[in-house]
Amino acid sequence: MSFSLLSLLFLLTPEAAGSGSASAGSFLSDPDYAVCAERVLKDATEGREFAKRWVNDAGGAPAQHCLAVADLKAGFPKLAAVRLEELSERADAGDDISRGRILSQAALAYLEAQEVAEAARAIGAAFIMAPDDDALYLPAAKVYAAEERRQATVDAVTAAEARGIASSEGYVLRGRARYTFAAYREAADDVIAALKLDPVNIDALVLRGDLAQQGIDIRADYSAALRKRKKS
């Protein structure tokens, strides 16, 4: 899959909420969810069967979320997306932040299924549900990039950065959008920022090569960052 399953699992945790809301994603505190997630990560097929049994045993929102993640890992992203959208409508899915993030997960799953229009619809619904949630901007940037809405991509990554949310993937998305505008210097800044976070990010390295062909040679040394990453 093209995006991190672990990120999908983490997106709803209270630690990621950034809002101080104790209820945001609180259903993931269910100890059975941790067991289910571990099984899914270890073996998609066995974990998916476990999640199905848990859903049938009235496991509620945590069980449905785990099953959606299992669908995704097993190679059924559209099914995962539909399941996540259904989950966002459940009374036990949490507060508006949780629901918005579930919808943003559905958007990413739709992207995995190459259903870009559905992804755009889901991320739009996420912003309606939780308009003040900073965590929605990076998923939105992925959707906008898939739609080739380049200025919207730049704006979404910039909004996330302004809120203290940065990722190598986000910088690459913004850098690639800026490259299409021939804003090569700004794109180079994004490459540098991306490689500082992830010195072996393939997309950032490809963009650096493309910039070199435009006469923008990035010679920064990322060996120290790479050594730090290996130690961690």
Image: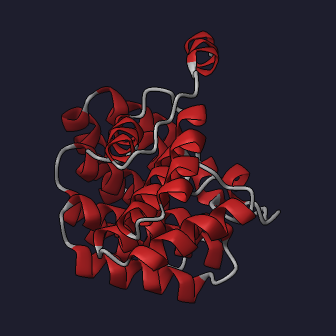
Q: Is residue 57 left or right of residue 178?
A: left
Residue 92 is at least partly visible in this image: no
Instruction: Give the x, y percent position of residue 214.
Output: 36, 49
Q: Is residue 114 above or below residue 184?
A: below
Q: Number of callouts in the render?
A: 0
> Which residue ends up furthest to the front in the rendered image?
215
Q: Is residue 7 left or right of residue 150?
A: right
| Foreground of the two, 19 or 140 | 140
Instruction: Give the x, y percent position of residue 187.
Output: 50, 55
> Which residue ends up furthest to the right in the rendered image?
20
Q: Quadrant of residue 22?
A: bottom right
| Residue found at x 20% / y 64% | 79
- Point out the image quarter for the C terminus: top right
| Foreground of the two, 107 or 221 | 221
Instruction: Give the x, y percent position of residue 148.
Output: 30, 74
| Residue found at x 45% / y 44% | 216
| Foreground of the two, 16 or 171 | 171
Q: Is residue 228 left or right of residue 191?
A: right
Q: How is the image coloured?
A: secondary structure
Residue 166 is at least partly visible in this image: yes
| Foreground of the two, 126 or 28 | 126
| Residue found at x 48% / y 64% | 183
Instruction: Give the x, y percent position of residue 229.
Output: 58, 19
- Point out the image quarter for the N terminus: top left
